[in-house]
Image (tube, rainbow, N blue to C red):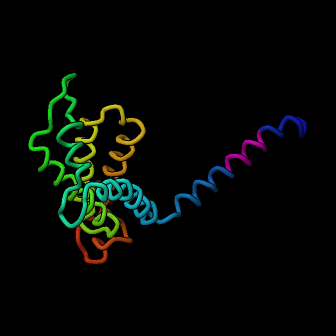
Amino acid sequence: MTDIDHAPLAHKAGLGWAIRRIETTIAAIPEALPLLALRFAIAVPFFKSGLTKWDGFLTLSNGARYLFTQEFSLHIFGSQYAYPAPILMATLAGIGEIVLPILLVLGLGTRFAALGILAMTAVIQLTVPEGWANFHLPWAAMALALAVYGGGQLSLDRFLGLGARKG
């Protein structure tokens, strides 16, 4: 065989080595960093939404009252249903959207906070069904990952010795 016959094989070996090297480098990133990034990524949109629901300490905004009593409805099996106890639901949503993101950022009760966000995402999906691909699916995936893996090494859960460790 000539050198020309070996060139594609040598190129593939070089490419394979490069890919393995990149994968090894990525795999060396401590899991604490992506878990921290996930905690912030899911916390920010929920916290920002929570801020819009309040006009002061535990004073529900008029906008939140209007949305939950007039605009929002649950879309279930092709039918729409009004929110049960809409002011209570708005208040609970507002509290959840402030408290749960703070817990996630701190990494305190991470798995429980993530499950709360996951439950809220399910209700949001029933309220705004067209948002599934751009918002609800990524939120659910982030919340599920945090519920399964916890907050990681850079969390108060780990610092305080709380929660089960994965793996």
Q: Name the residue rendered at 35%, 57% in the picture.
A: 48
If the image is split into quadrants, where does the C terminus sit? bottom left
Quadrant of the rendered image containing residue 39: bottom left
In reply to whether residue 50 is colored magenta, the answer given is no
- State whether the magenta stretch is mostly helix, strand or loop: helix
Residue 23, how many percent across, how many down? 58, 54
Between 10 and 162, the one lying in front of the other is: 162
Residue 155, picture quadrant? bottom left
| Residue that lies at the very extreme toward the top in this rendered image | 78
Indicate left or right for 12 with 128 as reference: right
| Image coords of residue 162 (percent x, y) | 23, 71
Question: Is residue 165 shown left or right of residue 45?
Answer: left
What residue is shown at x 64% (from left), y 49% (from top)?
A: 19
Name the residue at 16% across, 54% down: 92
* Residues in magenta, as a range: 9-17
- Residue plotted at (77% across, 39% down): 9
Q: Residue furthest front?
A: 62
Residue 15 drawn at (x, y percent): 71, 46
Q: Quadrant of the N terminus?
A: top right
Toward the bottom, the furthest residue is 160
Nearer-the-camera pick, 46 or 165: 46
Total marks placed: 0
Residue reaching furthest left? 85
Q: Is residue 75 left or right of residue 10?
A: left
